[in-house]
Image (spheres, rainbow, N blue to C red):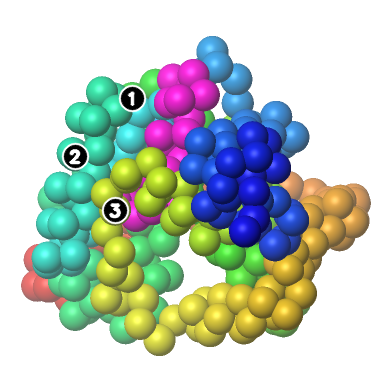
Amino acid sequence: MRKCIKCGEKAQIYLPQHRLSLCKTHYIEWFENRVEKSIKEFQMFSKKEKILVAVSGGKDSLSLWQALVKLGYDADGFYIDLGIGDYSKKSFNISIAFSEKLDRTLHTVSLEDEVMSIPQIKNYDNRPTCSICGTLKRYYMNKVAKHLGYRVVATGHNLDDESAVLFSNTLNWSVDYLKRQYPVLPEENSFIRKVKPLCKISEKESAMYAVLCGIEYIEEECPFSEGATSIDYKTFLSRLEEKSPGIKLRFYSEFLRKMYPILHIGEEKPHLNRCSICGEPTTGEICSVCNLKNKLKLKAGG
């Protein structure tokens, strides 16, 4: 029987990659300390700043939101209603209930009101749904955060997410994407600072925190994520993790330590314009979201 390394009581959690056995109380403490450690390591934000947590109703974003509040940060939530039938209705209700439990504000935006719902967009645009959805989420997170006076947007991307993206970008040598894969994207050129406090916490660790804290979250995956290559990469890396505990964390951490600085030697940052329609930053004359809106308007017949 494993015993908690902190108090000697029966351990409920064993973390092979960290060689840690912990009881419920000390696991929750460990998780929150881990979040705090990443915030400080990458100088993400301070307790004087207003933080907007991107909330989906899933375990990662809700766990992050609770941890930040418990750690004393001024963190509110932001939910984007994607309009994906019962999936969105359930995730929205869970997010609302959780905001009430935390006694924190949850700001919301409906894609159907702003553009079209994701299923509607899919009828007019044959690009991968996850790509379109990601573009819209980033746009509204940035725009709404600025409008509401938040300095920082925090997302629930975990170690599994980050290592899978890193694996994909390395396989394809997508240098421009690799240059941007850092836990902090600074505030510049009308972009709000974006941070990932769970970047060194695995999906399992996040799920265990949610379960032990009694956090209700939506367990179903987005129906449009089926068949996404990122899921295959996560599965492959998880198999490696089973054989070599800690390999995902080493892969990601060593990239940040050794390769990320090299990619930025002599780098010239691209010039950004303001979108002639909405005023958001863009490399062209019109931003990708306004282009999408124009495209959908034409295809939908005005």
Q: How far is the residue under mark 3 from the one under mark 1?
A: 26 Å
Residue at horizontal 47 percent and vertical 34 percent from the top: 67
Left or right: where 7 falls relative to 133: right
Residue at horizontal 32 percent and vertical 44 percent from the top: 214
Residue 176 visible from this viewpoint: no
Q: Which residues are magenta?
A: 54-74
Q: Are marks 1 and 2 in contact (CB under 8 Å)?
A: no
Q: Secondary structure at mark 3?
A: loop
Q: Secondary structure at mark 1?
A: helix
Question: Residue tagged by mark 3?
Answer: 217
Say whether disc 3 or disc 1 marks the residue closer to the N-terminus. Answer: 1
x then y, percent, for residue 125: 28, 78
Say whether disc 2 or disc 3 marks the residue closer to the N-terminus. Answer: 2
Question: Residue tagged by mark 2?
Answer: 96
- Tell me the quarter of the picture where residue 35 sits: top right
The N terminus: image quadrant: bottom right
Query: What's the residue type where badge 2 is placed?
Result: Ile
Left or right: where 194 falls relative to 82: right
Viewer-proximal residue, 155 or 152?
155
